[in-house]
Amino acid sequence: MIHHANIYTSQPSLLADSYEGFEREKVKEWYFFSPRVCKNGIRATRKAHLGFWRMSQSAKPIQHNGIDIGLKSVLNFHMESNKKSIKTEWIMHEYIIIDDNNDSNNSKNDFAL
């Protein structure tokens, strides 16, 4: 099942606990459609209440028949404690579709999976 939530502003452990059917001991992967809110026109806002999502690998293109159709990024959740960043075990694989018909990189309709 794929849920709709703003994963960028949510602490992952609280997000996993808030949906029925997520038994953290049994299920290790969850899927969400999430709106992408961008600051400065391009970069997504990834600040959560108690931490933030940091890109751990540069975005890699997803191709179909030799044409770039999307991007895949890998992000790690970091907790903030006394102005220090502590990397957690939470990992997000972010998939974004490239829309050639959209003139703006900051569309209100942008979503990530």
Image (cartoon, rainbow, N blue to C red):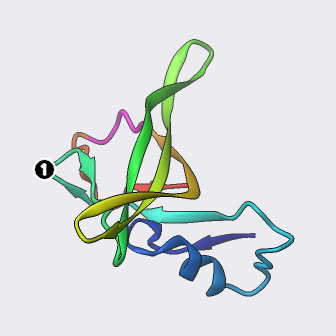
What residue type is disc 1 on?
Answer: Asn
| Residue 26 position in % (x across, y down) | 86, 71
Label 1, on which residue? 40
Does the magenta segment cover residue 18? no
Please state if 39 lies on the left or on the right of 101 as rendered. Answer: left
Q: SS at mark 1? A: loop
Q: Main secondary structure of the magenta part?
A: loop
- Residues drawn in magenta: 98-102
Q: Nearer the viewer, residue 45 or 110?
A: 45
Residue drawn where x is 48% and y is 65% of the image: 34
Tell me: residue 85, above or below residue 7.
Answer: above
Q: Identify the residue at the far top of this view.
A: 66
Residue drawn where x is 57% and y is 12% of the image: 66
Please state if 95 lies on the left or on the right of 9 as rendered. Answer: right
Q: Nearer the viewer, residue 73 or 3?
A: 73
The image quadrant where one finds the N terminus is: bottom right
| Residue 45 position in % (x across, y down) | 28, 59
